[in-house]
Image (cartoon, coloured by chain):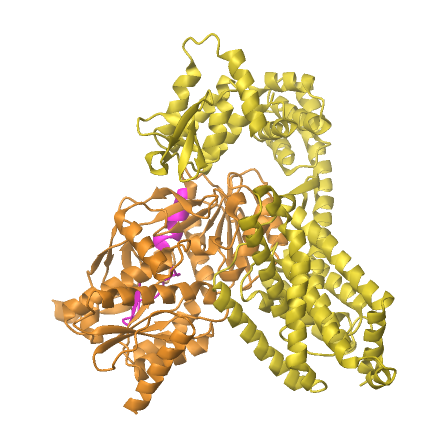
Amino acid sequence: MIVMFRFLACLWFLLAAPAFADPLADLIPKLGRGGFADKAEVAAELGALGDGRAIAALRALADGKLVTRADGSVAIAEPAGEGVKLAHPLTGADLGTSAADTVERIRINNRLRAAIAAALGALQIFSPNPEERLAAAREAAKAPTPELALALDKALAAETVPAVRAALRSAQAAVQLSVGTIEQRIRAVEALSAATDPQVRNLLRQVAQAAEAPAELRAAAETALRSIERRLQLAGLAEILFQGVSLGSVLLLAAIGLAITFGVMGVINMAHGEMIMIGAYTAFVVQEIFRAYLPPDAVDLYLPAAVPAAFLAAALVGIALERGVIRFLYGRALETLLATWGISLMLQQAVRSVFGAPNKEVANPAWMTGGFEPVGGFFVAYNRLAIVVFCFLVLGAIALILRRTAFGLHVRAVTQNRDMAKAMGIPVARIDALTFGLGSGIAGMAGVALSQIGNVSPNLGQIYIVDSFMVVVFGGVGSLLGTLAGAMTLGVINKLLEPVAGAVLGKIVVLAAIIVFIQRRPRGLFAPRGRAAEG
Amino acid sequence: MVKFGDKIARLGVIGALAAGLGAAQPALAQGTIKVGVLHSLSGTMAISETTLKDTILMMVDDVNRKGGLLGKKVEAVVVDPASNWPLFAEKARELLAKEKVAAVFGCWTSVSRKSVLPVFEELNGLLFYPVQYEGEESSRNVFYTGAAPNQQAIPAVEYLMSKDGGEVKRWVLAGTDYVYPRTTNKILEAFLKAKGVKPEDIMINYTPFGHSDWQTIVADIKKFASAGKKTAVVSTINGDANVPFYKELANAGIKATDIPVVAFSVGEEELAGIDTRNLVGHLAAWNYFQSVKNADNSAFIKQWQSFIKNPKRVTNDPMEAHYIGFKMWTQAVQQAGSVEVDAVRQAMYGQKVAAPSGFVAAMNTNHHLSKPVMIGEIRGDGQFDIVWQTKGAIKADAWSPFIPESSKLVADWSYPWVCGNCTAPKFKSLAN
């Protein structure tokens, strides 16, 4: 923001000197009058003027910061305490502060928003900020008009950043598709055929189907279309695979904790989902604390802080649950199931009483918002990517704990032969509590991850409990590797089926397939070892 | 038996107080008028319905503070049907037969309404149903204070077809898989085809309740929209599934200027659970938004926030519907001079309330309201900017003219029709 104002200030000194009739000064106040359609026209005119001083006003309008004052003039308003701080829309000059209800925010709608984006695109193509130039080039490719040709040529000549150059070149080609000689247009088609972008495909399709276009041009467009379609198909397949892995890692995160409590300890814990929920609510609480006590820049760091906090919170609840209820019920599966089911309902209602029934907002940190396209048609969202990475880190950490630490050795010993372990002097009761705490704590960390893609509500756990059991049973009770394989298989199969069968039918097909599979292999993908398996 | 019922009622009240549920007054059975509150306070729907329970408690509190009704105190009997559809019917029977409530305010999902409907018809009770729904119903025992499709879905689609709405040519109808989205989409599909939209320009998609992985559907929407024609999504996605859907939309970089999403079940309350900075410009269609500016609305918001003791709590459309419904009921009781169901029902017709939406809502003889329609765009702060609204109140159609089977049906509970789904008046011969 500050950089932009400086830039504007420079522009102002450069441009303001010959202050004769200024069309800009006439247009800006019009942004505050009339309907959305009228304002959209004004925005388009501002874009056509090509005067960079309009950027601040347009930006403010898009952000809902442009206001009309009592005298009908327009100003840029920044919230300041109770009131608002006003600035001149062109000069940025300080116009003092005023009460919030003395100014009227200028409302915009999507149509106006699109007009503003197009106008800003035209104005920002020479901006010093490469990101703004990139956005401008993309905007130009979206609406390629012959008027843009000259500006694009000039921008391309001066451009040094490769990504922006590429965007500018495809915008230029898109413009040349409709103007220029046949050779130029064919060259434009050839230039565009290297792109993998649905938008380019639409442009080429228009050329290929245009009746007035020469046959050779249409043939070139057809060829280009075919190669683009082929690459888009491949990109689509890659996207489905990524989605499958992403869903798989969500399932895996939800299920790892259960793989320990159910898989290793043999406790049917119906309150597992609520441990996930406790983790998600911990993320919410940590976020609120960060928002209340830390500067806005640091708020995005709440997520790394929430992970250990959620682990501790859920682990403590888990240990309390094991010591208070479950330890009296070892070996009595049905009673455990009923008792933990009851506890899950109590935990839900407790959270509902404390936090209220409505959803809580857990925001994605800025670094987890949005995503990137490695190739057109294959979109990777940052939050999904982060969850995939996080999930494998957690899995690796557990494998290390179980394989490489004394605690892990004890856990495995107790799992394999409880009495013998006891005889060897292992504190069985403590190990039980800690193992249950570990499983619950991991569920809590999963809750932090899941708060980034879904609800934070008292019912959060119920969404995942069935899926978690499915993954653990399918993968093989007692095997971490099985849980990994089970989660990934289910994720990818789900995503492969969904486009064909639809979400509802897809889910049914997967469930039916699992039932058949369990009939044939009751122990799941990876048969378990240890005494629990035989008993 | 009376004594026993009394005890239960007191227990209920004590329970409600103990759970911190609010200000139900412990009162004598003789001098009170009881109203039932049939909203889920636990289970999946608690998210939306708890607020409506509080709204009715607020209205009851308000009436009592102003001296009660017919000289008696009003007492709210709160029950929890726990998002369990058969339990709704049981609790409804308990309210009507045992508690002898004068009216019931309740239900959210259509399936819960369908579940209690036979009970209300059998015991001749009165249900005030505050949620927008699919229409195709008009019971003598239900007053529908939410929107019918012609007060929400159709105007929203018309707006998107207009120049201001972006002249949308291609449509994705996405919904949760149950009766409300399916019926609404059936009506919308017929409407779109009547407007000349080709079948290949309509994509219909259903997802289960609580669907949490939206990657495929959002990617499909992107693909469907990349065909070069302006595309919009009409969302009848309900309940918990909305948050992951909107998060996925935001992260997939779908901007409202590219593919606007208009929702019929997402209001201020639902947005309170989402970071809306990346959803600016997506739309919702309702009969009321909290951002409406008028004195009635300011008073309504103030009353709510002071009752719930939280200056950040938002108001929403179903709350406003309950506000209108409760006011109308108290007016009808005063007019009839009795809480007797048949008398109150007669007095309901033509009842008017100055609603927080800034318009006068009126009850029609088809048991539905005349209300304004508003389209709002989501702002960064979780509120809506109203970008379009009807000039006046629109009368609800109980039966949609766009579904061939229902286009001939009439709902009119006044003479000579006296019927909720007839093709001819019940008392035709006598009318001549």
The front one of B254 and A199 is B254
Residue B293 is situated, as x and y percent measured from the top left of the image, at 31, 45
Judge whether residue B415 can be spotted in this image: no
A472 displayed left or right of A198:
right
Residue closest to the far left: B432
State the residue in front, B431 or A385: A385
Q: Residue B168 in the image: state x and y as whole percent.
A: 47, 41
The image quadrant where one finds the N terminus of chain A is top right
Give x and y (percent) for residue B215: 63, 53
Q: Quadrant of residue A187?
A: top right
Q: Is residue A227 left or right of residue A57?
A: right
Colour of chain B in the rendered structure image = orange
Who's yellow, chain-wise?
A: A
Return the x and y of residue B176 as percentages of the image width and height. Answer: 51, 61
Location of the C terminus of chain A by quadrant is bottom right
Work out whether A89 lies above or below B149. above
Instruction: Answer whether residue A180 is visible to the viewer in this image.
Output: yes
Residues rendered magenta in the picture: B131-159
Relative side of B96 to A245, left or right: left
Does the magenta-highlighted stretch encompass residue B145? yes
A210 relative to B261, above or below: above
